Image (spheres, grey):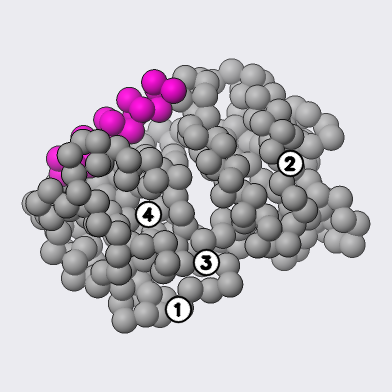
Amino acid sequence: MTLLALAVSGRGVVRSDEPAVFADDEGFLRGRAAFETTRVYAGRPFRLDAHLDRFANSAARLNLPELDRALFHGLTEQALAAAGQPDCFVRLYMTPGREGRGQPVSLVLVESLPPELEETRKRGIRVISLPLGLEPSLLGGVKSTSYALNMVAVDEAKRRGSDDAVFLGPQGVVMEGPTTNFWWRQGNVLFTPALELGILQGVTRGALIELAVDAGYEVEVGVYPLDALAGAEEAFTSSAVREVMPVVALDGEPIGDGVPGPAAKELQAELRRSALSG
């Protein structure tokens, strides 16, 4: 991925190699910052207002200043115009600013899509399960920059010869991935963990619930053990950048036939169609 453009509050578009935050910014010092990521289709960010709704909630939970939605709309438009790339993704950040100064910093980054994304989708990904054993925390459902655990989980998956991970909560229930929501299918029913577990309310997850019902699937949201995922006919994840990503193996064992399944392929096509139709 390549940083294509950067827009900063109070400065507008700046060079992508130009510093945007100070070393004593609380987002860097303490990880107290909120962010959102959404994919851009034909120059239009996907469900940007839904992302801003979640962004505002994360900011409030982190005791950041009230989110300036108009500012982020403007910064996003400026950054996308500067990037000149119709198919990409954007990251939106807000930090409290420099320690003790109380002046928040808002940033919008435009980045290129991972070049290997479609090839990975064709083969599917392998995941490992990682027990957390934690009850929903004070930051449950918050998208903050305190992402060390998430990144270490991906590193551990790769160390074990897989691509990603799925977190397990108390009693080994399936929760979410480091940057994704999880889904699996039995027959015509799609299962996904409930938000009450403290997982992130994925915007793409919400879109897929609508699209799946329209496509004739039943969607069941609840609390499920790892065996439910392991014994599924197929599984996949959902996220802004990866969209629908088939999961073909769990802890070294195949899920279903060990290849991307039909629901993942159908919902990926429906998601892309919905995004491009506006």
Instruction: Work out whether residue 160 or residue 26 is closer to the camera in this orientation and state it.
Output: 26
- Residue 31 in view (yes/no): no
Please, what secondary structure does the residue beneath circle 3 have? loop
What residue sits 46% from the left and 78% below the top? 135
The 10 Å Cα crowd at callout 2, few under 14, some 14 to 19, many 20 or more, is: few
Q: How many numbered markers are drawn? A: 4
Residue that mark 2 sits on? 68
Residue that mark 1 sits on? 134
Examine the rendered structure and indicate whether residue 86 appears above or below residue 264: above
Confirm or deny contact between disc 4 and disc 1 (CB under 8 A).
no
Examine the rendered structure and indicate whether residue 151 appears above or below residue 133: above
> From which residue to which does the magenta span run?
260-278
Please, what secondary structure does the residue beneath circle 2 have? loop
Residue that mark 3 sits on? 140
Instruction: Name the N-terminal-most of marks 1 and 2.
Output: 2
Q: In the picture provided, is 263 more to the left or to the right than 27?
A: left
Instruction: Name the N-terminal-most of marks 3 and 2.
Output: 2
Instruction: Name the N-terminal-most of marks 4 and 1.
Output: 1
Q: CA distance from mark 3 to mark 4?
A: 14 Å
Q: CA distance from mark 1 to mark 2?
A: 33 Å
Image location of residue 89, percent across then percent down: 52, 33
Q: CA distance from mark 3 to mark 2?
A: 23 Å
Instruction: Name the N-terminal-most of marks 3 and 1.
Output: 1
Examine the rendered structure and indicate whether residue 242 appears above or below residue 110: below
Confirm or deny contact between disc 3 and disc 4 (CB under 8 A).
no
Instruction: Name the N-terminal-most of marks 3 and 4.
Output: 3
Q: CA distance from mark 4 to mark 1?
A: 17 Å
Residue that mark 4 sits on? 181
Please, what secondary structure does the residue beneath circle 4 have? strand
At label 2, which amino acid type do we have? Asp
Which SS does the magenta portion mostly show? helix
